[in-house]
Image: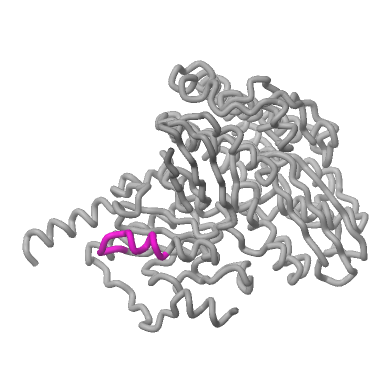
Amino acid sequence: MSKIPLGPFHPALEEPYKIEVTCTGETITDAEITVGFNFRGIEWLAERKNYTQGIALLERVCGICSNVHTMMFCRAVESIGAIEVPERAKYIRVVMAEAERLHSHLLWAGVACNLIGFETLFMTCFSLREQVMDVLEGISGNRVNYAMNRPGGVNRDITDPASVLAAIRTIADVTTKQLIPVLTTDPTVRARCAGVGILTREDAIAYGAVGPMARASGIDIDLRKSAPYEAYDQLSFDVPVRQEGDVFARIVIRALEILESCKLIEQAIEMMPVGPIAGGLFPTVPEGEACVRIEAPRGEVIYYMASNGTDMPARVRVRTPTFANMPTARVMALGQGLSDLALIQASIDPCYSCTDR
Amino acid sequence: MNIFTSLMNTARRKSPWVFHANAGSCNGCDIEFMTCLTPRYDAEQLGIHHEGSPRHADIIVVSGPVTRTTCEALETVYGQVPDPKVVVALGSCPATCNVFAGSPTIVGPLDRVLPVDVYVPGCPPRPDAIIAGLAEAAAILAGDKPRPVHSAAQPSIADSADSEA
């Protein structure tokens, strides 16, 4: 029996966290995860900044899903102040959210390939991801931190829908013809991922897993379907679900979600009505409280906001999907080989900067 | 300059190895740093190699406003990088703390903890800017470019923790 501490600076993953595993030989018998290395006190800061500054602050909760956080902040303000969002702005929000899901999933697929030692596919994923980044940059002017949302609408219009459509069709094409066949049939990927890090349906429910983690364990849960927001109720798409609950199932789920996101962007661009993209001046936020939730690339995000009628929120609470998914790492790691630990960890698609805030 | 120094300088100029430490960053800089290594930007054309162990690295790239919890580990990692070494501050957070300035849980900016040689500003900086920053760091390593002067009085972590407590 030996104890192996790993971290906080891990050679494979980008973010600091600490995991201490107890092993008998090569088999993991216990695992303890320490987080909190990214704790920047964002909720504390959010109570001390006005709403305009709050958008810039909340955008920096996470660099991968930055659009989700500004959208949530604005939706909370809209919910408290009963502010109407123009139809066109709703569709633009869908396009941004789905493009962000594309880049997040492709990033994750790249990191996972890197971890299983499949360098070529890692590079393929990342060069495909660059095309998504071009779309995001074309719409918003920035590659990360898009600053697209504001209470009552969005800041920028989609002025060149044809180029977005062309890029999305290329991405869907490459994903169908190259990425999915390799990810699902390649013996290297199967050997490293199939049957590894199994999370049963019961465990997924008991631990409250969300997003692709839950969907890979046979739980059909997606807020875009069950509680549609923005323009999702106008669009048709499928929610892929797998029963196996292993790392392989999570790879397949995310690969299929890439295709669904491409489908959603295409529909949203084609159905987008003409009209204004935002209301007038920045609204005054009345007294009140709101709880909003949406489906981020990693699962359900919940924001709670309380306002006391001043220009600063009285309380902003952020609960991100990794916070719900992380405890499952222990169940998945037990009984597995030590060499699979990094892959099992990564299969959650963890975002510790979201979790720690 | 003898032949060995000249050889060493060529090696440092042509193949700087980079260790990346995330000191409480939001991931934005980190994913852009990853992007540098991939086909479109391809930092390896300059011999830049991303290394998992600080003991093999020449350049330490730090992103994030330096949270209290990562501060000690960051100093340890910095100590593990062999001399000569260059510290690159990636993004606006290690330079100024960015939007997190004033938070009680951070000890940044980075120059309070480590002597910073190259700043790459931006939130996040573009991959081109990151590669330019790494190239500048390699020039400092090889002695082609003077190292910036660091103020002698670097308050240690213990001092800053005491003064804020």
Q: In this view, does A88 lie to the left or right of B52?
A: right
User: In the image, what residue occupies the spot 66% across and 40% down?
Assistant: A325
On whether residue B77 falls in the magenta region, the answer is yes
Image quarter where the N terminus of chain B lies is: bottom left
Single out the residue that lies furthest toward the left: B2
Q: Considering depth in this image, is A115 or A92 the residue closer to the camera?
A: A115
Q: Is residue B135 left or right of residue A332?
A: left
User: In the image, what residue occupies the spot 89% across and 68% down?
Assistant: A308
User: In the image, what residue occupies the spot 51% across and 46% down?
Assistant: A19
A24 up-or-down from B108: above or below? above
Q: Considering depth in this image, is A337 or A294 the residue closer to the camera?
A: A337
User: In the image, what residue occupies the spot 42% across and 29% down?
Assistant: A118
Q: In this view, does A42 lie to the left or right of A248?
A: right
Please state the horizontal and vertical placement of residue B50, each as a whole percent of the image.
36, 47
A184 up-or-down from A295: above or below? above
Image quarter where the C terminus of chain B lies is: bottom right
Q: Does residue A103 show up?
A: no
Marks counted in the figure total 0
Q: What stretch is highlighted in magenta?
A: B75-85
Please state the horizontal and vertical placement of residue A323, each as a whole percent of the image.
67, 46
Please state the horizontal and vertical placement of residue A356, each as a whole percent of the image.
63, 55
On whether residue A165 falls in the magenta region, the answer is no
Rendering quarter of residue B111: bottom left
Q: Does residue A161 show up?
A: yes
Q: How is the image coloured?
A: one colour
Q: In this view, does A214 lie to the left or right of A85?
A: left
